[in-house]
């Protein structure tokens, strides 16, 4: 899966998501929250939320690593839909899942 490593602002928050060392007591109770507030003030809350839920595909040791290839379930769905992809008809796909907040609000 090739895409821009910072497509969802993940790299902007990499130090918050992937600290270079195990957390100290200070990090656990104060430091992490101070870094989170600094990052929200610098980049905004929506980009932080987007980076968390989107994941990333380039750092296997990083948190939210989504893998290097498609999941088997995606392949099964694509194999089923592919014969219809080049037809003149319309395919509608409804993705039903829980959201992160109120309906229609990101």
Image (cartoon, helix red, strand yellow):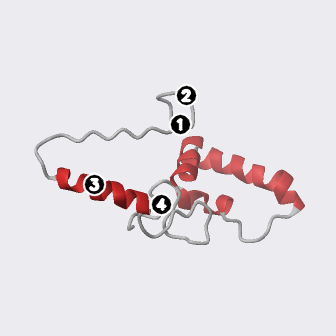
Q: Which circle marks residue 80 in the picture?
A: 3
Residue 43 place in picture, x, y as percent: 57, 48
For the residues labelled 4 and 2, the Cα–Cα distance comes to: 26 Å
Judging from the image, what secondary structure is the residue with disc 2 in? Answer: loop
Alpha-carbon neighbours of circle 2 within 10 Å: few (<14), some, or many (≥20)?
Answer: few
93 or 54: nearer the viewer: 93
11 or 105: nearer the viewer: 105
Alpha-carbon neighbours of circle 3 within 10 Å: few (<14), some, or many (≥20)?
Answer: few
Residue marked by disc 1: 99
Q: Earlier in the sequence, mark 3 or mark 4?
A: 4
Residue 81 place in picture, x, y as percent: 26, 52
Q: Is residue 46 above or below residue 54?
A: above
Q: Residue at x 51, y 52 (%)?
A: 54
Q: Residue at x 86, y 64 (%)?
A: 24
Residue 48 place in picture, x, y as percent: 58, 48
Displayed quadrant of residue 49: top right
Residue marked by disc 4: 6
Q: Classify the position of the N terminus by image quarter.
A: bottom left
Question: In front of the other: label 3 or label 4?
Answer: 3
């Amino acid at each position: 899966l090739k895409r821009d490593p910072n497509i969802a602002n993940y790299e902007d928050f990499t130090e918050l998501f992937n600290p270079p060392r195990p957390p100290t007591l200070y990090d656990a109770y104060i430091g992490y929250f101070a870094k989170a507030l600094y990052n929200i003030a610098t980049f905004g809350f929506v980009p932080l939320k987007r980076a968390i839920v989107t994941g990333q595909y380039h750092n296997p040791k990083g948190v939210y690593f989504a893998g290097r290839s498609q999941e088997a379930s995606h392949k099964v769905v694509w194999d089923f839909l592919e014969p219809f992809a080049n037809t003149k008809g319309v395919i509608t796909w409804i993705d039903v899942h829980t959201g992160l907040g109120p309906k229609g609000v990101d």
